Structure formats: structure tokens, C-alpha cells
Amino acid sequence: MENKKVISLKYAKAFLNIYLDDISLDNFNAIKKAESFFSTHKKSLYFFSIPNISSEKKENLIRKLLQKFNLLELFEPMVKTLIASKRIFLIYDMLKHITRLYKQRKNIMMFDIVSSHELDKDDLETIKTFLSKKTGKKIISKSTIDKTLIAGIKLKSSTLLWEYSIYKQCETLRSQLTL
């Protein structure tokens, strides 16, 4: 299992060494969607590791999946390499490594912007500018509405959380009163 991670990491690094500048933000989002697909459909990965299934069938399936995510053209050389080396089953781990490494190499941090109400474009840009100044990174964000905040905002990434909301103030007050 550890060997699988090491090999998929090497493929991901090699892919990014060649194609880093060819990956647009749309491609990056598509790669994340493909990664999410494989994460929620892990049984589909077993298909790629069954030796009795021909390489041609595996190649056709992976091509259809990548085409669904508009990634076939970008990943065509990698698919050929993985099929030729009988390692197409590494595709999910490779996609995970690609998204992580891409964010590192492009100095990107992803944030969920959760607010109690819908934010307009200017508000979102102001928040992204704030986050960019605080983190020193380019910000990619996804915004959602959470009425339980009552009023306010929550900004969260994989490593950071910043929240200023009525809900949080109520929870802080509640915890202080129960002491």
C-alpha cells in the first residue's frame, strides 16, 4: 500500500513537471471533481486492478471518465503511460497528489466562505483580498450560505478557521455561563 502511494506521487510530480503551466483554473477544478468522483466511487478503482480485464477495456473506461470531466486531452499521455505500465489503478492517488502539489507549486489556498446571507461579488473580492494578505497565498474560494450563523461570516480552509458571527458569540457566551 505504501509503495502504491510512493509510485503515484512520482507519477504526479512527473506530470506536474511537464504540464504545470498548461493546467488552467478550470482544469484544476475538473481534476478536483474527478478526484472527488473516484473518492466516492472507490469500487470503480477495483476494475482497473483486475488482471483478467483487458488493457483496452480499462483504457476505454478511463478515457470516458476523463472525457466526462474534460480532462482527456490533458491526461492523454499519462493514460497511455499508466496503461502501458499496467498501473492505471493509480489514477485516483495520482489525482490526489496532483491537486495537493498544484496548490503548493502555484501558492494557492482554498477557502470555504460561509455567510449568513448571500454575498455580492465586491464582498467576495474584499474577503479574498483579506485572506490573501493574511496568508500570502492566492485564494480560491467556494461560497455557501448558512442561516444558523444568524449574522456574520466563517472562513475556513484545511488548516485555518476565522469566524465572526452571532452564532459563535452565543456559543462563547453559553460556554462561559456554564463554567
Image (cartoon, rainbow, N blue to C red):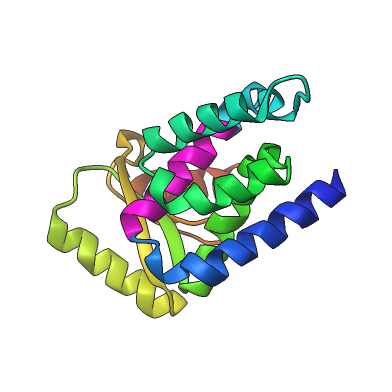
Relative image position of residue 57 (x, y in whole percent): 59, 24
Q: Nearer the viewer, residue 123 or 153?
A: 123
Please indicate whether residue 131 sits to the left or right of residue 76 in the image. left
Relative image position of residue 46 (x, y in whole percent): 71, 25
Q: Is residue 95 above or below residue 43?
A: below
Q: Is residue 33 above or below residue 134?
A: above
Residue 36 falls inside the magenta stretch: yes
Q: Nearer the viewer, residue 117 or 143?
A: 143
| Residue at 43%, 75% in the rendered image | 137
Q: Is residue 179 visible?
A: no
| Residue at 49%, 57% in the rendered image | 157
| Residue at 47%, 74% in the rendered image | 107
Residue 34 falls inside the magenta stretch: yes
Q: Is residue 46 visible?
A: yes
Q: Which residues are magenta?
A: 25-38
Q: Is residue 136 above or below residue 172?
A: below
Q: Is residue 46 above or below residue 125?
A: above
Relative image position of residue 87 (x, y in whole percent): 72, 42
| Residue at 53%, 62% in the rendered image | 160
Q: Nearer the viewer, residue 61 or 163?
A: 61
Residue at the far right: name it: 2
Please indicate whether residue 165 sits to the left or right of residue 125 in the image. right
Quarter containing the N terminus: top right
Q: How many marks?
A: 0
Give the main secondary structure of the magenta stretch: helix
Relative image position of residue 121 (x, y in whole percent): 15, 57
Please indicate whether residue 1 sits to the left or right of residue 28 in the image. right
- Corner quadrant of residue 47: top right
